[in-house]
Amino acid sequence: MTLTDLANHICTQCGMTDTDDVAAAQMFLQRRLEMIWNSALWRDSLLEATLTINPSDTTTLADSYWISERSVLLLPSAIEKVIAARLSTNTLEVASLESYYRADTDWLDYQGTPFEFQILKPVVMEWPTAQIVAVSDSNGADGNITCNYSFSPDGVTICAGSANLNATIGTGILQMFSFSKAPTQGNVTLQQLVSVSVSGVTYTGSPQSSATVTVTQGQTYTVTPGANENGVTLINGTQSVTLATGTAVQITAQGNSITFQAPGLIPAGTNYLEGEHRLNGIALNTQYNLVWGVDEGAAETGQFQAGMVNPGAGQVTSFNSGAWNYIQLNSTAGALNGAVTAQVYAANIPLTVTITCPVTFATVMASCNTPPLHQRIRLTEAPTVSLNLRVLGKGKCPILGPYDTAPITNVEPALMAFARGDLLLRQRQFGKAALAQQEGAALLKELVESEAFQQAGEFRIEPEAGFGSDIWWRTTPDSYHPLG
C-alpha cells in the first residue's frame, strides 16, 4: 500500500475525509514511520558499503572520503549509524575512545593491519588540512537569506557563525559539523575553494606585459583581481574580460592556461610627431619597458628622459624610473617623414590575483534545511597499504512520496494503528486514541518478534569429544573444581 492508500484508509475508518485530514494523516504516517524505523535494527534498514581505501587518500566508493593522516574514514551519507566493520581477513571490533586512554595510548600511533575501529562524531565534511569554504545559491532571489554553521579550525576548537548565501563562510575550516538554512528558491551548494598557485608569477614579456597561469580545461574558476590587476585583460581562450580590483569573475577554462595581459601606460600604436610628449604619474623606482617604433620610411630613433637615450627602433628597452615621476618622449632626430610610434608598459610586477576552483562537497535542496552528514570511523592500527573494507550500517529513514510504499516489510498494520491514534488525538478523542496506540504497540511487538525469529537459534561449536573430562588438570576452574 502506498502512502496515499494508507492515509485514505485510516481517514475513512475515522470518518475524517477532508483534505486537511488526509494531509495530517500522511504527516502522522511519516512521523510514525521514522519512530518505528529508529526503534529496531530492521533487516530492510541495513546497508553494506564495500570499498577499498588507499594510502593516497582515495577510496573506490562514491561519497566516501579517506584521510590517511588521521586514519579517519567518512562513510557515504546514506549510512545513518555504523553497526559493524571488517576487513577481508578479519573482523574489526568496536572500541571506545576512552579505552585507549585508560590502557595504552600508543595504540593510536601504531601502524599496520587494523583490528579495531572507533565511531566518531558525524560531520558535514572533514579535510586533511584547513580549507576555504563558501556557500553558493543557484537563485538570486535568495541573496538575503542567512545560513548558520559550526566548524572546527583545528580539530579541538568549536566555532559558530552565520552569513548570507553566496559568501565565503570560513578561511580555515578543518571539520564542518553543521549547516542550516531556511527554505530557499534554489538549491544551495557548499563548496571547498581550492586555490591555484600564482606564487612567483610576474607580468613579463615583450612587447606586451603578461602573465600565464596553468589551469584545467573545462573546470570552473573564480578569479578575484588584486591591486596589480586593475584594468588588466583576462584572456581565456576566445573570452576576454577587463578586471577591476576586488571584483570576482567566474570563468570556465577553455584551455590549459589563462593569461593576464597588462595594458600599456602608453597604448601600442600611439603616434608621436616631432616635439616633446610627457607621461606623468608613473611610479618611482618601478621597472618599465619601452618599445620605440619607426616612421613610415625612415629609421629615426627617439630620445626619452628617464635614464636612457636613443633607444633602438623596434627594440624593447628596460629602465627604472628612478627619481622621475614622468616619462618624456622626444622625437627630434632630424626631420620626420611620418609619425613615430611608442609604447611604455610596466614590467616585472608580481601577480596578485587570487584564483580558486570551487569544488562542491554538499548540496542542500531548496526545500531542505540541512545537508546530509557523513558518519566517521577511525581505524586502529593505521593502515599503510590499500585495504578492502566492508562496513555494515543502518540507512536513513526515507521520506515517502504520495505513491511510495513503506520501506519495512509488513509494517503497515502497526503504522496505520499508530497514525490512526494520532488522527483521533488530533480530534481530542482521547479514549479511542489510546486504544489505537495500544493496538499499534502490540502489532509492533509482533513485528519485532517475527524479525528476530530467524536469529532465535543458538549456534555453538563443540569439540568432537565434548569439553573434556572433569579431572583436576582442567584449565577452566570454578568454585566446584578449583585449579589444583
Image (cartoon, rainbow, N blue to C red):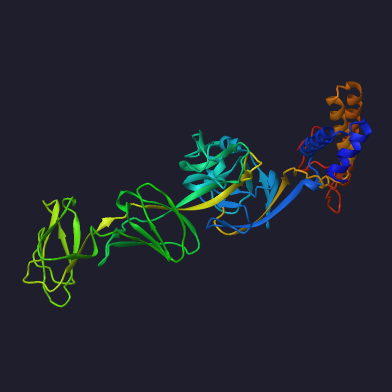
Q: Is residue 129 left or right of residue 271?
A: right
- Residue 272 picture quarter: bottom left
Q: How many marks?
A: 0
Is 59 left or right of 431, judged from the image as shown? left
Q: Residue at x 59, y 47 (%)?
A: 362
The location of residue 320, given as percent across then percent down, is: 15, 57
> In the rendering, at what x and y percent does residue 71 appear?
55, 49
Task: Name the quadrant of the C terminus.
Answer: top right
| Residue that lies at the very extreme toward the bottom in this rendered image | 297
Image point (77%, 41%), residue name: 476
Looking at the image, residue 73 sits to the left or right of residue 427; the answer is: left
Q: Which is more toward the observer, 3 or 373? A: 3
- Judging depth in this view, the residue of 47 and 16 nearest the camera is 16
- What residue appears at the point 46 percent right and 65 percent down from the top-left corner? 254
Between 65 and 303, the residue placed more toward the observer is 303
Q: Is residue 452 in sight in this rendering?
A: no
The residue under the point 58% across, 34% down is: 102
The residue at the far left in this view is: 334
- Where residue 357 appears, as percent x and y from the top left, is 47, 54
Front residue of 152/30: it is 30
* Left or right side of 325 for 125: right
Residue 34 is at least partly visible in this image: yes
Return the x and y of residue 202 as percentages of the image width and height: 29, 58
